[in-house]
Amino acid sequence: MSEINTPIKQPPSIKISSGEYHQRWRLIKDAMARYGVVAGGLGVIVAIVLIFFYLLYVVFPLFISASAKSVSEYAVPELALGNTLLLEMEEQNEVGARFTDSGQVVFFEAATGKTMLTQTVAIPEGTHITSFAQGSPINQGAVIYGLSNGRAIVVKHQYKVTYPDNVRVITPSLKYPLGEQSLVLDESGAALEQIAVKVGDDATTIVAKTADIENNPGKIRLINFQKEQSLFADEAALTRTDSILEQSAANIADILIDKDEANLYLISNDGQMGFFDISGKTNPSLRQQQNVVDAGQKITSVAFLNGDLSLMIGDSSGLVSQWSMVKDKSNRRTMQKIRSFKVSEKAVVAINAEQRRKGFMTTDADGIVGIYHSTAEREMIKERVSDALPTAAVLSPRANALLVQSADGKMHFWHVDNEHPEVSIKSLWQEVWYESYPKPDYIWQSSSANNDFEPKYSLTPLVFGTLKAAFYAMLVAIPLALMGAIYTAYFMAPQMRIYVKPSIEIMGALPTVILGFLAGLWLAPFMEEHLTGLFAMLMIVPVGVMLFAFAWQFIPKRIAHNLSEGWDAALLIPVILLSGWFAFKVSLPLETFLFHGTLRDWFKAELGIGYDQRNALVVGVAMGFAVIPTIFSIAEDAIFSVPKHLTVGSLALGATPWQTMIRVVLLTASPGIFSAIMIGFGRAVGETMIVLMATGNTPVMDLSVFQGMRTLAANIAVEMPESEVDSTHYRVLFLAALVLFMFTFVFNTLAEVIRQRLREKYSSL
Amino acid sequence: MIKAWFKSGTPWVWLNAAAVSACLIMVIGVLGLVIVRGVGHFWPAQVVQFSYQEPGGEIQTIIGEHVDSSVTPAAMAKTTGHIMADDEDTLVQYLVKTGNRDVTGTDFRWILERNVKQQQAPADLMVVERREWGNFYGQLVALKEGGKVIAEGDQAWPATQSKIDDALAVFGQIAHLEKKEVGAINYSLEQLRLEQKKLQLENRWDAPAQQRVAAKKAELEIEYKKYQTQLLELYRNIRKDSLVAKTENGKEIEIPLAKVVRIYQPNTMSLFHKIGHYGVKLVEFLTDDPREANTEGGIFPAIFGTVMMVIMMSIIVTPFGVIAAVYLREYAKQGFITRLIRIAVNNLAGVPSIVYGVFGLGFFVYILGGNIDQLFFPESSPAPVYGTPGLLWASITLALLTLPVVIVSTEEGLARIPSSIREGSLALGATKLETLWLTVLPMASPAMMTGLILAVARAAGEVAPLMLVGVVKLAPTLPLDGNYPFLHLDRKFMHLGFHIYDVGFQSPNVEAARPLVYATSLLLVLVIVGLNLSAIVIRNNLREKYRALEG
């Protein structure tokens, strides 16, 4: 093409003045067109690069680590009002609250420390606070004060948001959900040394440990209030049930109740955890008593993970372990350690769980704050927040800010940027032990019924499903397509080839949605009914073809010659139809004779293989159908363009056509055939509609040919429309798309490079 | 001898030939299946009356269309819980479409052949196609007007026919008023609301503007009232007639004529009648809106949406594809860059279509569309205009998807043009652009056409990416209508391929919808096969032509 590229010199003879302008204009137009066309051509590269980088751009935030930065540091507001029992922060990170041991609640601006409001909790005269506990944050900020006279009081802190003049104003206040009167928990008036509360919509459970009085050792009391809505009154009546735990109250350092008010955990000083079933309200029973820290270590901090299904237990060596309810072999629920984090060398002072995800924050004795995600096993943030010993810490409800109070009387307010903690290489690709699962597993379950369970993003079952579907499709497609290509390119009569090639092209042009529809609604039920017939066909048809071929040589040469030269394929159509029909006919008696019923039942009974109606076999056939034309046309092209002199030479040396085919043609064309298979495989991997319609779309990892699967592509098609923009789910789906893109990119590029090489080779031969 | 035969390699050649035959059988089989099932959908089937007696039960009457039969061998039937007599070697079951979903709760019923005592096709059995609850099968008893019986017995049938024609005409008027006229008013009101909001945002919401908007609003309200009274009158008119029909178990129910689409007695129809009926149904299928959650009626919006999308896509893809091909063949030096481009083209062709969907959703819809909304349509926020899947984004996404098809095909066409033609043109003093524009491209135009046809065929059948960038199961309005600016690129649309997926797999009544899905498939297959065949023919002609040129 180089001769065209040389610039064209205008012949000097054209010298009309207006023509000169015209000439220049022509040249300008030419140059402009050149740039335009070059830009257009390079645009193709831009497009593919843009797709790649855009996918990458969306996926990238999943893997950048979180960050935290100090916003402000100020003196603890109203330090004189007592030590901090609990720090809290509301949803918008604007208001902080400090609950003191003198029964005061100090609301302050989280960013500046300016006191907004100080409220005094209605503690009866002559008593003092002996214990304090926070209901989990899900209860909208309920806390309980245990008093020295065996009474307790439950308080809620609330934040009302209003928009006067389009400015957000947050007003904090206190409320008493069980009445402003303190509740009598212990009749004898023993001080409540430890206390826990769970305030639910229709029930409230309080567990308290009383102090020893003289000969009367302390007990653990369980009090349950059941709210009963009467039909006529607006006020609900509270029914109270009391019971006492059969358990020594000595050493109890912490009490935790889960949000269903069904499980109770008692943590003792010596590292023991007792797990009680209190779902019966009146007869609490001990289910498990276990040492939960290493010998010589002490439990320093305990908290529920969001959902109250796991306990995070921090010890004096800086180890935080996750204990979760697991069903053991005899189907009993027990607490088991499912993973642990070494967060520090020093003791863990506080653990704060995130309220919407399975993450948590730890604060150690050195003032180092760490934010972790449990199932992803990722350390997101590790920062020194304070130089002095921290005394209280809180992570905001949206987990985007934290507040730490330290022993030197300072409050530290930090912002946290932690968007996608739940994704890590491990959680995407390896087995993860999720809460309430018996063992680590690969699970894709992007949405759950409620917030207690986290979405599970393991791409492994999807990739497995993708490869499984592609594998079965290739199993169907490769033999048919390659054998067909060999015959069409080399043995077929040219007149027949004129019809065969377009037919295969039409086959490739059929919309996959139609193939999927037929596979799902016609082929799947058909196969379920005629499984034996299908297997019989696989065996009988080749035999039938061979028999016919063998018989053909006895046909008088004259007739055979006229008919068969390159038209064998046409001759075989009735043979195949006939033997296929025969296979289905004999399959029924055969099935009854061999399997005493249906083959499906036999598989189930003898081999334990279940049968899904929409399974890998259906997908294999339907997707094989879709892939055949791709492989066929590229392979046929490669075989057909093998230079004639090679084959002619081989034939002249006395090789049979078949020998020439195998030893010369296939060998020469093998790179082309290889690239055909790769491109076909790439197509099978990315095919969406067929798998969407012909499988059950369950993300299971099962190699069985009679089971379904869910592929990456189908998964995107199913879930993408419902996923929220820029959420973790959205980005993980983009990651799935990126995986598909990369996969096909590698295969296609490789195939194309091989084909280009092959073309050069052919032209040099 | 067998050994020698095997050694000659002949059996392997035959086996290879068998592979080709198998492929051909598969193609023809799939096409045949779709055609047979799709074509049959509109043919009025005989309505059969079965006298059915279950062992130990009373004789009951079942009326319906015999849709399917299944034959199960005795051994298998036993495993599924059927009691088989010793002399029975097969269990024959009929699938009967009994309709009357409002009475019985189901449309279909499996019955055992051995329990059928008698089977006949009485002439007075009728089928009522309804707008709700699917078909009705039964006998006509009477015709009522305003609650009073006006025809009974033999007179009922002809009277009903004429009444139904009237009712249909009224229904057509109502549909026209509601969709066209009232729809246009609603659209104008919405535009006014947006205009008001826009003016408010720009701080130009002054007295004259307020007056103008209020005046227009009042005008529209008056018009709306006018149509409302018309509609009320029409509704009263159409609601007064009803027919009384008897179901298979003798129960009489009243069906308002307003809910009737068509009524016929298939058992009395002559072949001629049936052909006429077939034609009417076919026209309805092609030109009507879907009814009953897409399982009945026509697929016109899906056809229209597909065509619109394909046209938009063609407008976008053709220039880009042709320019890229021209660059590759005419301008670029064959070397590293062209190699890279070819790899890129191949990758574009090989990237799974769903990835285009993901890219289109993220990049076109959310990034481009979101920014367009912010810049040009602040007044409609928070409702997105272009920041949501729609026709424009679907077309662009598919244009990207089909770009390689156009490039490859055009390039092939350009490659076939002998270089002597270019050289001749250049030698006569034409610039390169003139050579291209006046000689090369016109000669290559059939190749471009081929590429475009193939691209259209591909786009028409592609579903996966469209599910993300703009297709919906039921679009309330077409993307092209009589409301300014006529072409609404931001609207979502229906698509034939997606319709197949949606009706076949997401519909509440898959069994009833199946014939419609086959018919839709047939239409799609016909379009795509037709397009591909024409592309093949053009290409073959082209090859012949250039062979002649070269020779």
Image (spheres, coloured by chain):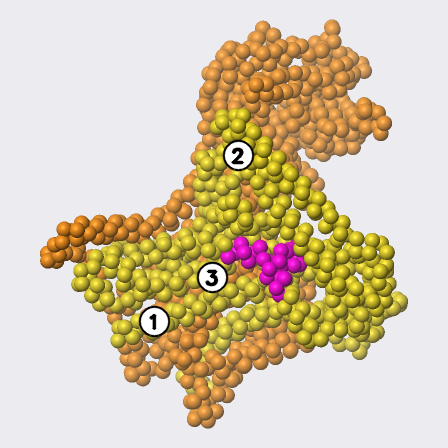
Chain colours: A orange, B yellow
| Of the pair B78 and B276, the residue shown nearer to us | B276
| Of the pair A549 and B408, the residue shown nearer to us | B408
Same-chain status of marks 3 and 2: yes
Mark 1, residue position: B543
Classify residue B119 as left or right of residue B223.
right
Mark 3, residue position: B457
Task: Say whether disc 3 or disc 1 marks the residue closer to the N-terminus.
Answer: 3
- Point out the stretch of residues depicted in magenta: B282-307
Subunit ID for the residue under disc 2: B
3D distance between C-alphas at marks 3 and 1? 21 Å
Task: Say whether disc 3 or disc 2 marks the residue closer to the N-terminus.
Answer: 2
Mark nearer the viewer, 1 or 2: 2
Callout 2 amino acid: Glu
Q: Is residue A421 above or below residue B363?
A: above
Subunit ID for the residue under disc 3: B
| Of the pair A568 and B272, the residue shown nearer to us | B272
Mark 2, residue position: B195
3D distance between C-alphas at marks 1 and 2? 57 Å
Task: Say whether disc 1 or disc 2 marks the residue closer to the N-terminus.
Answer: 2
Q: Position of residue A108 (x, y in %)?
A: 57, 14
Q: Which residue corresponds to the image point at 41% horizontal and 74% vertical from the top-left? A: A486
Subunit ID for the residue under disc 1: B
Mark nearer the viewer, 3 or 2: 2
Classify residue B505 as left or right of residue B10.
right
Q: Is residue B173 above or below residue A397?
A: below
Residue projecting furthest to the left? A12
